[in-house]
Amino acid sequence: MKKIKLLALMICCSIVSNNLQAQEYWDKIKAKKSTLEIEKGFINLNTKFFELKLLKSSQTVAALSPIADKSFDFTPGDRLSIRDKDGLYQLGDINLRIKAADGTWKSYSTAAKRAAVTALNVSGNVLAAANLSNTLPEEIPLIIKRFYEEKEGSLIMRFEITNKSNSAQEIGALGVPMIFNNILEGKTLDETHLQNVFFDPYIGKDAGYLEVKRLSGHGPALLLLPEANMPFEAYRPLLDDETPRSIVFEGFHEWMPLSKAYANQEWKTAEQWNSPTSLVLQPGEAKNFSLKFVLVDEIKNIQSTLIQNERPIAIGIPGYVLPQDVDGQLFLKYKKAVKSFKIEPEGALVVAQKSKDKNGYFQYAVHGKKWGRARLTLVYDDGLEQTINYKVIKSETNAVSDFGHFLTTAQWFDQKNDPFHRNPSVISYDYETKKQLSQDSRVWIAGLSDEGGAGGWLGAIMKQLIDPNKEEIEKLQHFVDETLWGGIQYNTADTLKYGVKKSVFYYEPTLMPEGTYSKDVNYKTWAAWDKKGSDDPGRSYNYPHVAAAHWTMYRLARYHEGLVSNHTWDWYLKNAYNTSIAMTTLAPYYAQFGQMEGTIFLLILKDLKTEGYTEMANNLEAKMKARADHWRTLNYPFGSEMPWDSTGQEEVYMWSDYFGYADKAKITLDAILAYMPTMPHWAYNGNARRYWDFLYGGKLSRVERQIHHYGSTLNAIPVLEQFRKTPDDFHLLKVGYGGLLGGISNITEDGFGPAAFHSYPETLRIDYLSGDYGSGFFGYAVNTATFITNEKELGWLAFGGNLKEKGDVVEVEITTAAKSKIFIAPKKMWLTLDAGTFKKVSYNTKTGTVKITLDSKTDYTPNAYLRINKDENLPYEKIRGAYKIPLKSKAIQINL
């Protein structure tokens, strides 16, 4: 098992000043004077559910373990002897900004200059307490005391803040650092999944919470809840903590109930998730701020744990990314009714209460009216305030159509005599400057390969799978013949045939005419590969993009008429097959890992079998089984070229499931659910964790939690696949569909697909490069579907359609862009179309009868090809396992 090395030069060059390797940063931290006074010992405390270890000197948390598993520590206690210095945050610290007499904000932190705190006498449910004045500057006009308390077995961390001055004091920022063990440096994958955690915020004011989950996805998990005066208003990255951020450490954040001082200064150009607030304390006035630590036995039980702790529950259908043609629903459960609500911007949403059902949920109809971000603020009768952040998008059909148009116009590169032979192609794009990106120091971005460079053309081709456009396909055929085949992909009859280059753009000024390379680009970096490096076919991650392109063109040629004319369907399918095989022979090292978009190889295999290409199918299956057999020998079989990753899991699950390796499929799915939450916030709902790819494919290059990077849709593939196997697990549908729609949430109003959305509160916008978005759109294209389910508490629901109940009949109008897949959960019925589109489907809950309505024929789609996973006897010819249904000039209805 390879070790996770913090020395990764490519990352260090990007985020560590003066080109120091990150290990040197650790060495510098170690060399600093220790100030936490660990040698003075510890205070060991217990509640019913927690074992708590405090440092005697600072009374900050040295370890926090569940009683059920005392060997596990939620905090980075294993690095306490290194991180025991000034300026390094510990759980139990607090940060503030107070308005000075001159009107400026002055910052204070208990972590800045350590000194022993003054212990206070405790009694009753108070476990430990201290006055923190010694570790704060003398001039601070406040007295801050910290208490650790037990409440019904859970743990309370409470800060009491008193204004000791003779004048009113405005607190413009208050933050409690969330210091949990997400430092993966130096560990194996086995160790990280046993010892480390990730955490996800629901930034929802009084209803907000923080999930802290083990990488394995196994319980117990930790839930932090507002206890008193602790609304989750903002989530600030602690960039001043010197723990080196990299691919093995995302960084720490703090929970902020007050954020006005930052919103007015550092964050003033960004629209915040919540309205920023401050607090004025009068002379002598005291106020408490507290958080509650709660254990959850399983991740999927977070919602039920919130209910047990009398916290508001919100369930959005189909989530919080809301297409404008979708009848959204919102279910709320709380001990008090909603007194009022507010929508910002005004008119962005239309919200209307429908009913309160027998299970205690208030049901609302929600419709998106104005494209863009929208905030719904709910105020309950007891004054509790909850915010739900939505993203309103165009209908999926229109969003996808705009995306395809943007790619094949604004991003269509056809510069004559391009020295790197990239014309014609869909090239990377800078949305800020509104220019194509033909040069970049990360050569792959301008070189049509790797995720960050292939994203444009991959997205353009995958768009055709679900919304074929003849004019766009004509352009893409030229791309295949003139740029992909023989350019990005080797096509000569030698050992490199079907290999895929790392980049077709490279930096080698001695080989190129003077003036080829811009003087405004810094090519003196590791990422400026020379020609030899760019021509290298040894990076397996480039192969799925090309295989997906060939496969999509095969599907268009095979199941439609007149859309593809440059090659026959079998040429494309054989190229898809040979590209898949070439990955295992020309890029064997990285091919041992799960690939992003690796699902494509399974799709190719299934079509080889459908076409009767037995020898090729057997060969491909054997190659993939060898990889899956290797994964079966590993405890956590989803590494990648990165030490920890969230992209290999997709393919590992799909092949493990295909070959019947149920244990590995479950381990993989559990890990996905650990870093892919469901919560009432469009940015985090279904957002698979990814925090370093802005370095490789973004314009604003930094380590930062990415909002709906390609991991969201790719990880949604196994999650929704598993839901179809276990349709009673509603948690899977919420997570998977959140990732699926999250994948198209960042497409701009005019159709630009960005790498991801920036989560830092100073930014909160899309990245301006197209980057690796195409990988995400692949996940959407192959996985988009309509799901119809009868949830035991909420009733009949549709994800990807508008549902109406008419007596015993449930009817759903399909709203996805593809309109080609439907899953009816109570029947476990999976309906898919290789060509043609569903208009609507109805299900008689009494008789079990299903009726489907197919849209009329088009110039290029005279026939529908329907596949059903149930035994049916329809009066149509069956071809390659699908019913060939002649379409008519009007919609037709078929009874199943």
Image (tube, rainbow, N blue to C red):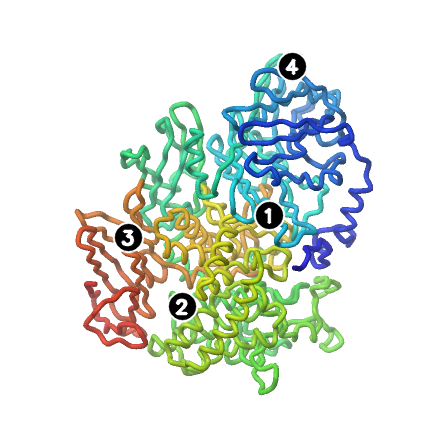
Amino acid, disc 4: Ser
**Secondary structure at numbered mark 3:** helix
Closer mark to the observer between disc 3 and disc 4? 3
Closer mark to the observer between disc 3 and disc 2? 3
Q: Is residue 412 left or right of residue 318?
A: right
- Mark 4 residue crowding within 10 angstroms, few (<14) / some (14–19) / many (20+): few
Outermost residue toward the bottom in this view: 493
For marks 4 and 1 on the same chain, the one whose residue lies earlier in the sequence: 4
Kindly identify which residue carries mark 2: 465
Cα–Cα gap, marks 3 and 4:
65 Å
Please give the label number shown on residue 826.
3
Please give the label number shown on residue 194.
1
Task: Give residue 840's position: percent from left, percent from top.
Answer: 25, 58
Cα–Cα gap, marks 3 and 2:
28 Å
Please give the label number shown on residue 322.
none
Check if mark 4's residue and mark 2's residue have beta carbons within 8 Å: no
Closer mark to the observer between disc 3 and disc 1? 1
- Mark 1 residue crowding within 10 angstroms, few (<14) / some (14–19) / many (20+): some
Cα–Cα gap, marks 3 and 1:
37 Å
Name the residue at 73% across, 58% down.
9
Amino acid, disc 3: Pro
Name the residue at 32% across, 65% down.
832
841 up-or-down from 159: above or below: below
Please give the label number shown on residue 167.
4
Task: Give residue 889's position: percent from left, percent from top.
Answer: 21, 70
Amino acid, disc 1: Leu
Whether residue 266 is visible here, answered yes or no, is yes
Cα–Cα gap, marks 2 and 1:
40 Å
Cα–Cα gap, marks 4 and 1:
51 Å
Could you say which quadrant of the image residue 770 lies in? bottom right
Q: Is residue 96 left or right of residue 798?
A: right
Closer mark to the observer between disc 2 and disc 1? 1
